[in-house]
Amino acid sequence: MSDTMECYRDMDLREVFGRHVFCDSVMRERLPRETYRALHKTIQEGTRLETEVANVVAHAMMEWAIEHGATHYTHWFQPLNGFTAEKHDSFLSVPFGADKAIAEFSGKELIKGEPDASSFPSGGLRATFEARGYTAWDCTSPAFLKEDSSGVTLCIPTAFCSYNGEALDKKTPLLRSVEAISKQAIRILRLFGDEETKRVNVCCGPEQEYFLIDKEMFKKRPDLVFTGRTLFGCKPPKTQEMDDHYFGTLKERVSAFMKELDFELWKVGVMAKTKHNEAAPAQHELAPIFDTVNIATDHNQLTMELMKKIADRHGMACLLHEKPFAGINGSGKHNNWSLSTDGGTNLFNPGKTPRENAQFLIFLCAVLKAIDEHAELIRASAANAGNDYRLGALEAPPAIISVFLGDELAEVLDEVEKGIKRDVNFGGKMDFGVPTLPAFQLDKTDRNRTSPFAFTGNKFEFRMVPSSASVAGPNTVLNTVVADALCEIADELEGAKDFGKAVSSVLSKLVKKHKRVIFDGNGYGEEWVKEAEKRGLPNVTNSVDSYAAFIKDESVRVFEKHHVYTKAELDSRYEIKMEKYIKINTIEAHTMLEMCRKQIMPAVMSYSDHVAKTIVHLKATGIPVDMQTNEETLLCVTRNLAKLNSTVKKLERAVERAAGLEGDFVKAAHFMRDSVVATMQEVRKYADSLEMCVGKEYWPIPTYSDLIYSV
Ligand code: ADP
Ligand code: MG
């Protein structure tokens, strides 16, 4: 148990929550009223922040941070490498000629930073001679303190862009996409008579899955250390067949980790809510209470960071990879997504009156339209090298994008399409004349665990999202494509003479056109693949193919129209994603080769040597023993070893050829997928066969049984 653990025992969780956040109540308490108001307006309405205001805020923030033990501040940002970045500056200042230090933090330092950014991926957006990148304070995500045994640091969430204003991070496009969807959603709300709403927020609750294994075991597996997943390993006799781990009793060691994690998350304002064991042995999940998508994204990054850090304190390693172990459940990040007005109305809540229902159906059908028209983009937003091993395997949703609505809602849409009117007594005044819309009151939707995109009562759950990735990307895409659908719908409705009739006809058209994307059956079945093909739904099975969606003309049009990404920014994302795919697989291949050459093959040779010697020895004794077992073992070992040796050589050649393709990332990524990754599977096959015929004490690395039952 770690030391910090002890001190949580007597704490009141209400006192702990938000203790390390420069939150609204702290600002209200510490800022002069005028400053607070100005800042509040900036946060709520996106107005410009004046320098004088920034100076006062910066000073108050510094004082607060120092009182909590902080010595440094950092602009905390999310570059395109998928991680978070920070460069620490102390508050220390010594005026020229003085011999005493003062603490200083100006508005300018709060608002803007200039980290040398040449080593972050930019996908050609920023030539290295123009290495300067700028970080800009995102005041809509509160500043917080990071505390550990090394001290306390004030972290200021920031956006990161180039000298020319091109986004070099994940936050900027996300914020732009929120603006886009808010703008379009408000157009729809106005049509339905809502004059109050000023902003529509995107809400997100990302459920984070992860594995915990013993740190000592982890360290003995170079593949886990270098790549985050096992490149070898046979499935143990028992994994998740008995369904005994899912929601099972928490082991004390795991529970202690979770408790410390909860407290550390609460301190920085992350609303950690639910925790439980997941399907696979050693697999767990944490779900926060949903928040606006910008904050939820920052918080999810923090959650992943703290998971790793706290696991380490507890002598464990936290694996966030999508498929750390072949053959058993992988990890995802169910991205719960909804739209909510600034007054707190969830726009995906089916209403109590026909009028509310009509508006709900418009938003619902906008999502159907968006998902159907941009299925490949949605798919691409959840693609990474790790997810290639997960999508379509075991628990994971298939690579085909479809939407689950539940029987009742599907029936309602069917009636909408056909213009059937249902007679339901709402008990209220029928104040909205939509002639052919069915009236309905929904029960909570039924469940479907196999759909990649499921409507779950008042929100959508996008289940393809990779466990290790930032949720910024998928949400940016989702927000933008839905914004575009809402925009087209608003265009049509705004011009209508008879609004009621127009709503009915628009809905009917939308359902007719996009119902093919609705699928309520078993998404894991083979029949679905065939059915989806018949319906013309794309089935993009790997990330290399899927990334192309980012640079398709239609994608460029949508992103540019809504000012989310420029074409140059999209090109850069495409390049970075492809390059990352190449790098990950290069590292995996090198790790595999090294493990084969330095660990597995020598171990197998020792074992076969031992068996061979035994055979010779037994033969020499002249005792009449049955040699069959020994000889068969030796045969199995030597055969598989020979095959392993030849596939290792094949992999070496493939890796070498891939390296020769540097400079042409499209060709290199395809070669990686078709040749290197494919050969890696072959190498694994023979290595795993050897694991099954070599004596346990000879096998040089912890096995799956050792790893997944290590905690
Ligand atoms: P599950 O049954 O899939 O575990 P839950 O209902 O427990 O789903 O919620 C899972 C996540 O969805 C939580 O993070 C929760 O806060 C979030 N969530 C709930 N309502 C919304 C909403 N309206 N918008 C976005 N996320 C939501
Ligand atoms: Mg879920």
Image (cartoon, rainbow, N blue to C red):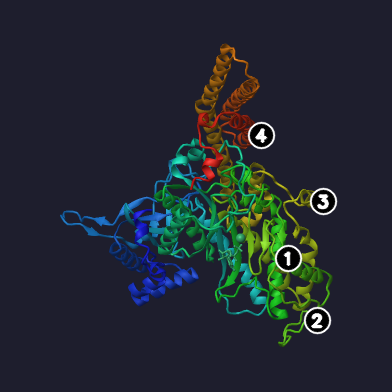
**Label 4 sits on residue:** 674
> Which dot marks residue 464?
none
**Label 3 sits on residue:** 534
Number of residues whose C-alpha sits closer than 10 Å to that of mark 3, classed few (under 14), some (14–19) or many (20 or more): few
| Residue in the image at 80% along x and 81% along y | 423
Q: Earlier in the sequence, mark 1 or mark 3?
A: 1
Number of residues whose C-alpha sits closer than 10 Å to that of mark 2, classed few (under 14), some (14–19) or many (20 or more): few
**Residue type, numbered disc 2:** Asp
> Element under label 1?
loop
> Element under label 3?
helix
Q: Position of residue 426 (x, y in %)?
A: 73, 84
Q: Position of residue 588 (x, y in %)?
A: 55, 35
* Closer to the camera in the image, 57 or 462: 462
Q: CA distance from mark 3 to mark 2?
A: 35 Å
- Left or right: residue 158 compared with residue 611: left
**Residue type, numbered disc 4:** Asp
| Residue in the image at 37% along x and 64% along y | 9
**Label 1 sits on residue:** 406
Q: Are marks 3 and 2 in contact (CB under 8 Å)?
A: no
Q: Residue 83, relative to residue 498: is it above or below?
A: above
